[in-house]
Amino acid sequence: MDKDTFVEMIKDYRVAIYLVLLITSIIVIFPHPGPSGIETNLQFGLDLDGGSWIQLEFQSAVVTFKSDMSVEQFVTDLKTKLDAEVSLVDENTLEIRKGISEEELRQVFSELDTELVSYNPGVTKATAEDVKRILENKINSLGTRDAKVYVITALNGISRYVRIEMAGVSMGEAQEIVGKQGKFEIRIHTTGNETEHVLFGDAIQSVANPSQTPPNSNNWGVSFVITQSAGEDLRQAAINSGATKSPDGHNLDMILDGKVVYSAPLSPDLAAELQAKATTNLLASTGYGEEGREQAKLLEIHLRNGALPVGVTIAGSGSVSPELGDQFKFWSVLAGIFALIAVGISVYIRYREPGIVLPMVMINASEVIILLASTVFFLQLDLATIAGLIAVLGTGIDQLVIITDEILHEGKVPSPNLYMKRLKRALGIIIASAGTVLIAMLPLAVMDLSTLRGFAMITILGVLVGVLVTRPAYGRIIMSILSK
Amino acid sequence: MNFFTYDISSISPVKLCVIPAVILLLSLLSVGMMWMQTGLPVSPGIEFEGGISVTIVTDESPEDITAYFSGYPLVSVNEGINNGKYLKFGPMDDSTVIEFTKKVEERYKGAKIDQIGSSFGKTLQDQATIAILISFIGMAIVVFVVFRTFVPAAAVVVSAFADMVMTAAAMNLFGIQLSLGTTAALLMLIGYSVDSDILLTSRVLKRKGRFDEKMQGAFKTGIIMTSTTFGAILAMWLVASIGGIQIIAEIGAVLLIGLLFDVMNTWLTNAGIIKWYMTEGKGRLSTAQRGA
């Protein structure tokens, strides 16, 4: 190929797009020397970096119903019958926070003359977000290095699982962290900076969601109920410290794991009430507006002591040690390289022409680079994804062979006109088969079969990058090479 | 490169399809029997059935390991290379799982533990079934849209179906269990299988020339396609097996089996149906278009 054909080739939009994408990809991956060998921007999954995951299943169901009873009456009756927390999501949807099967629930509903219209195990988006926040808070407060919490939500908007991934933590540690309750305490200021113990977290019986008092006032707070004896303790502490007489200067501190998370004086009302008698219903107000609401949400978590608003069971869990992860990394890179070599050998046996074999292998390798770069943005590179990457390498080379053979039909290099016609025909075959791969993998990418999502996404991406960018570019490059 | 010439000019369409038909029948039988036993076409692994798998590196004997884990539902101990041991346990309840994890980590540092609860396994199983169904139907729709003629499109779909069923039967034969990885591989097979089928069918339908020559040309391209893919996957499977990467090795094994069946189903099953269509089936519809 002389200089002119080369320049002309690069100027072709197919080749230009391919080159730009390839160079961008290398920049995105950004391989550079670091303290532990070559470092990149690639995000590795737990099975390559080492760490643990736990997937929890909510003991809860979201149901819709049709009832002749008034909604309030029905919810109240249902609560007593099930002995469970039941909350109204909208006028005919309920969230029942108890692990109960559809059959059992249908039985209970029929006793209340209500029709169970639909049953979905899981929680609403709002509850799922709460759980996520609580877990994140808990994990962060324990100083865990690198943790991610994912809520797994089905297409109908109901979340059945939450998945926690923690890098560099063994499974035993992970279970402990997730299951661990924070140490919560309320203390009262006596004189100066001195404080005195009032109650521990176990004295808190229930915590309500953040609310406004009075309603719609935008004055946020969290109300909670403490045990009878803790109520007495609080009264004694308030009287002894002088808080009932002069609330200011005798703040109540809420402390989680040794850190003050909330501090406020008794309200005048409460101070007066405590002077007279003990109370078990308390309200901690957090202020006005959006900030008050955020504060209230946080406080709710603290009051709940790190406990989740809904029961959970372990659906699944797993762990890989960092050493094993490193080993997997090494072997999967090796698997990729050997696959590429195998591809090179087999096309060489077929064509015996470096002018064809080299571009083929290079296009194939650059598809892998482009795909790796695309994972930086929205995928973690795990073992299944790597298997997908190598499988894509397999289909990719298939299609390069189709192009080459279509064009070289009868062993001769055709005129540019005929060439383009044949390239189009080859791309037609490729688009058809790419379409089927895309459709075949789509369900896996949309559904959440945890580990397989990466595999499906990388396959789909591979098909798209191949059909739109690399294979047309290959067609153009091979034309310049062959028409020497 | 000509190992042998693909010449089916003297073989009747029915004869071409006999061997694949017999294998398909046997495969359906194997898959059907497994279905009756387990509710799935391939014997389900831990991910679909629930249970715990533990991978450890130790020079202890299987007997020692069995003794250490007495009291837990140990199903099997498999030995790999380099003292690797792969233990399988049945499902346990939450508190037992936590207790069990501690017991594993106490003795075997760096163990790889995977646990799936039985109800979660059931959910995964249902989802995987739906995924395979949707994928297959979607693939069939695309193929019919592309060819817009019934017989050639049906030939592609039948070959893909045969690929999957035969591979599933082979998995039962070799004791490869159905896991998330192998499910993905089966889905990937749809793509691989359709690749060479579409090549064959569009070469024969859309190009001019003698039928047998077009078949030979398609075969030459098709077989190199399959063998390069086979080479790539073989390398992946070998390296992953040596390196002990279970999931990649499983995916690789299933793809390799599937690719072999794909060669048969493309060049016997699909070729047979297409030949019948070009020489007889289509002839009945319009004699004017009868092939050479």
Image: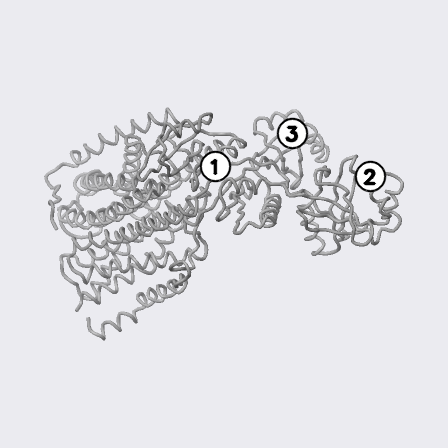
The disc labelled 2 sits on which kind of residue?
Thr
Task: Label 1, secondary structure: give it.
Answer: helix
Give the labeled residue for mark 3. Answer: A114
Residue occupying image coordinates x 23% and y 31%: B23
Question: In the image as oriented, which residue stretches furthest toward the bottom?
Answer: A4
The colour style of the image is: one colour
Q: Nearer the viewer, mark 1 or mark 2?
A: 1
Task: Label 3, secondary structure: give it.
Answer: strand
| Distance from the alpha carbon under mark 2 to that under mark 3 | 38 Å
Chain of the residue under the numbered disc 3 shown in the image: A
Chain of the residue under the numbered disc 2 shown in the image: A
CB atoms at circles 3 and 1 under 8 Å apart? Answer: no
Task: Report the disc number at residue A279.
Answer: 2
Marks 2 & 3 on one chain: yes
Residue occupying image coordinates x 42% and y 40%: B111
Say which of A100 and B149 sits in front. A100
Vertical comparison of A340 with B174: above or below: below
Residue B182, percent across and down? 35, 39
Chain of the residue under the numbered disc 1 shown in the image: B
The disc labelled 3 sits on which kind of residue?
Thr
The disc labelled 1 sits on which kind of residue?
Glu
Give the labeled residue for mark 1. Answer: B106
| Distance from the alpha carbon under mark 3 to that under mark 1 | 53 Å
Q: Is residue B130 left or right of residue B97?
A: left
Q: Is residue A115 left or right of residue B175?
A: right
Does residue B140 show up?
no
Vertical comparison of A68 with B245: above or below: above
